[in-house]
Image: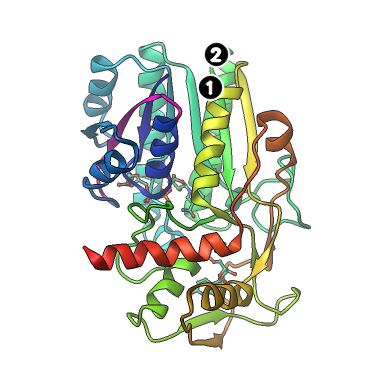
Amino acid sequence: MRVLVTGGTGYIGSHTAVELIKRGNEVIIADNLSNSQENVIDKIKEITGVKPKFYLTELTNREETEKLFKENKFDAVIHFAGLKAVGESCLKPLMYYNNNLTSSIILAETMAKYGCKKLIFSSSATVYGEPERVPIKEDFPLSTTNPYGTTKLMIERIYTDLVKADPEWNVTLLRYFNPIGAHDSGLIGEKPNGIPNNLMPYIVKVAAGELYQLSVFGNDYPTHDGTGVRDYIHVTDLALGHVAALEKVAESGVHVYNLGTGTGYSVLDIVKAFEKVNGVKVPYVITNRRPGDIPECVADPTKAYEELGWKTVYGLEEMCRSSWHFLEKMREN
Ligand code: NAD
Ligand code: UDP
């Protein structure tokens, strides 16, 4: 298939591009490089032997988006492009609503205009708000606690309404849990700008001596050691979830899947595993809870297994090892 990957130089998009190419798909990447670098295209070539065509595209711009479709006939679009920092979204809500909603609407309008109606969208477990229990199933109630999450939920609703209005559309909403890790080659991975917000990139910087210590946000949650529990998923497993959705979801309609492992680890589980696997120290201090955090967020991935034949294969050790390996490779260059 010829697949447009928006946000394809970013963290999850680049790993997905690799897996798509490995399965024989033609990948075209569009990104405005607001949170990624163009040299990722060369890294993808180094891994796969194929250099995907790259467009520097601002997806909130209709003409730039249309150019992609004028010059290529796509079988499907995987839409990763978007802003994703929760804290920043609270400080700059209009920027988040404008970027994430406008790009998603213009993209779908352009797809309709050019007769491409197969779309896979990057949603997030954040749309479950504060779940009453775990593991979380796809039919749990939806709510959000910050503007970033609200953009995801709004886009899910917009695309769902689109399918209602035009049943020819085939839309898959993939709700990711906590992606971490990097490609086995160490050539692509997560490169946050500035001080990271998320746990794994923060741990990596502490272990590397670039940051002094990790703040563990609370140890009084109702979890096995009091620290927050999440469902961490290796980014390559997540990428393969997109390949499965692309290949298996044949019927039109809206299809929703959790992409997680079904296993929860606490902050301290991650710290200990990271130290052990990589032979490094991660000094930490317990601090107050981070506002908006929930105690536990773990997927029930049964639906994705049953309908897409997809399940995760990487364990926590590989997630920790590959995160560190990526940093070591970056230091070499
Ligand atoms: P990322 O920032 O690495 O990648 C997103 C890419 O989109 C970046 O390369 C950025 O330059 C590009 N982009 C942003 N706005 C754009 C625009 N208007 N036009 C063109 N390109 C634009 O993020 P990621 O971690 O790879 O996330 C990919 C998607 O998955 C995002 O939609 C994110 O919200 C979603 N998601 C991520 C996580 C996570 O923890 N990483 C969890 C759940 C959902
Ligand atoms: N966390 C932490 N210190 C940090 C960053 C995160 O203790 O510097 C905790 C956070 O409270 C949560 C877990 O790590 O329990 C995962 O947080 P992250 O921001 O990576 O993802 P989230 O699940 O919040 O999207």
Q: Nearer the viewer, residue 30 or 100?
A: 30
Which quadrant of the rendered structure holds the C terminus?
Answer: bottom left
Q: Is residue 308 left or right of residue 324?
A: right
Which quadrant of the rendered structure holds the N terminus?
Answer: top left
Q: How did the renderer colour the structure?
A: rainbow
Query: What is the x, y in percent for residue 155?
Result: 50, 37
User: What's the residue at 55%, 77% (across, down)?
Assistant: 276
Res 194 seen here: yes
User: What's the residue at 61%, 77% (across, down)?
Assistant: 268
- Residue 234 lies, with reference to residue 206, above or below; the image says above
The reply to whether dot 2 and dot 1 touch (C-beta < 8 Å) is yes
**CA distance separating discs 2 and 1:** 6 Å
Label 2 sits on residue: 166
Label 1 sits on residue: 162
Q: Nearer the viewer, residue 109 or 284?
A: 284
Q: Which residues are magenta?
A: 23-34
Which label is found at residue 153? none
Query: What is the x, y in percent for residue 152?
Result: 51, 44
Q: Nearer the viewer, residue 219 or 113?
A: 219
